[in-house]
Image (cartoon, rainbow, N blue to C red):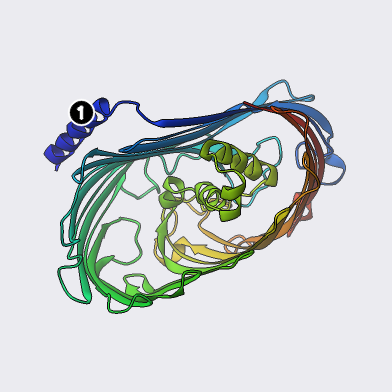
Amino acid sequence: MNMLVRLLWVGCGVGVSTSGLAAEWSSVFTVPVSVGYTDNANLAAGDKKQDESFWRIAPGFGLSAKAPHWNASVGYAYSLEQRSGDASHHDNQHLSAQFDSEVASNLLFLDANATISQQRENVLDAAGFSGQNLRDVYSWTVRPALRHQFANASRAEVAVAEYGVSSSGSNHAGDGMGERVNAGISSGGMLDALRLDLSGNDDRFRYDQPVAAAAANETHSQSAALSATLTVSPRVTPYASYGYERYYDTVASARPSQTYWRAGTMWVPSARTNLDANYGKRFSGETWAFNFRHNMRRFNWSLAYVQDVRTGRQDFVNPESLAIFNSLNDNTSLKAAVPDAAARAALVGLLMQSQGLAPITVLADRRYLDRSLTSNLAYSTAKSNSSLTVYWRDSDANKVSLPWGGGNPAGAGEHIRQKGAGLNWGYRLGVNTSLSAGLGGNIEQEPASGVENRNTYGRLGLSYVLGRHVSGTAEFRRNDRRADDSSRDYTENSILLSLVGTF
């Protein structure tokens, strides 16, 4: 396998170096400069509240390139903040970068991505404007692949991915590097009304430090599966898979080395509607997946439910913030309004930052049974856009893992229940003026310790285009938390005034 890795890396390096820079490039640079005020800088309860003013600068850029054989995009922002009552400064970073290339036609490919996102160090504690309780999580993946599609639509692929996770702050349980090897072959159109897919993968991750006191310093999983898909009808596509999986995991509560199966169907009654649902069984018990989407001229609706085993590392390598970014960036109405990819990426980044999207990632890097239900309803007109999101999630490591070595630290993410809803609305008042608002709340619980937080938030913003390259925004926010322990209750009201230069 090491020889295969070397051959793929050498081939990709030669191919990329000779591909040249003949591409369509687009870029956008933003420099937001802000001043603000908060009546509760430390998110303290009652008479312990302390008001402070602050200033913030957050330069960033978006860059994209499109070429015949490769595409690339990168969005980056650095935020530096200084409070009047604090001698030290607060800073964080956001990064989303992707690169896809066809090094050798229909044979050798190279994909890569990198992200920097903020996750709460204690998933049950608050995260205010100052960045407290937030830590940077760095993740990256580089994936060369040998892939060939034959004339009869059959396909074969072998890919090797190197990936890593690194974090700032005091919690480094998920830090390390891994290697994933995937191989697969598909019958394509060789068989009438049936497609067969044979796949296998080997995934090894080495931790910088053990995930638990009695755990090994690496996890290793292997699996292989045969899948069959009926292709008789373009509207109804049944499928099933049968395979074997093996996990070398010293903290697993059951020996996860046995066969598994999954069966389901895809239903596409029209170009606007699609449904994908399946049911199966593996070492952890039953698995479910349901994904429904319906698009209309002004409405988009989605409903999804998943019940399966996940790991904390999956949330790091595929952070939720990146999924939200991709969802917003692919919005049909936004694409029509901002066709330039780099400008749209910068706009989405500013939108996410202004909405204060709360991270809900489970931080314990262990296997856990994850059940989640999410629904989103979006409505757009020529002047407005609205989005309502409702979610419920139960993530329990105790269902599939042994107790945490040395006890269960509160807020580490052993078992977290979350449910909430958020409504965001934007309206264009005129050619240069727009109004935005957000309202939502969530309940977070940790059954083992009895901790429960009930959070509500509200936001109201006004933006005005001052010139070709300069715009101004004014924003008011209110956050409120009611906890099982009154000493952890707090309210925060804050105001932010910003000038944003875009070039």
Would you say 170 lies left or right of 469 here? left
Label 1 sits on what residue type? Answer: Val
The quarter of the rendered structure image containing the C terminus is top right
Above or below — where is 192 with respect to 52? below
**Residue at horizontal 79%, vertical 55%?**
486
Instruction: Specify few, some or many for label 1: CA neighbours under 10 Å numbering under 14, 14-19, or 20 or more.
Output: few
Above or below — where is 297 with respect to 472? below
Spot occupied by residue 390 in the image (x, y as percentages of width and height):
63, 65
Residue bearing the label numbered 1 = 14
Q: Secondary structure at mark 1?
A: helix
Q: Is residue 177 visible?
A: no
Displayed quadrant of residue 369: bottom left
Spot occupied by residue 157 in the image (x, y as percentages of width and height):
19, 52
Residue farthest to the right? Answer: 47
Above or below — where is 93 with respect to 395? above
**Residue at horizontal 67%, vertical 43%?**
127
Residue farthest to the top? Answer: 87
Camera-side residue of 264 and 370: 264
**Residue at horizontal 70%, vertical 35%?**
130
Above or below — where is 445 with respect to 334? below
Would you say 392 lies left or right of 188 here? right
Spot occupied by residue 400 in the image (x, y as percentages of width and height):
39, 65
Q: Is residue 204 visible?
A: yes
The quarter of the rendered structure image containing the N terminus is top left
Would you say 197 lies left or right of 264 here? left
Q: How many marks?
A: 1
Residue farthest to the left? Answer: 3
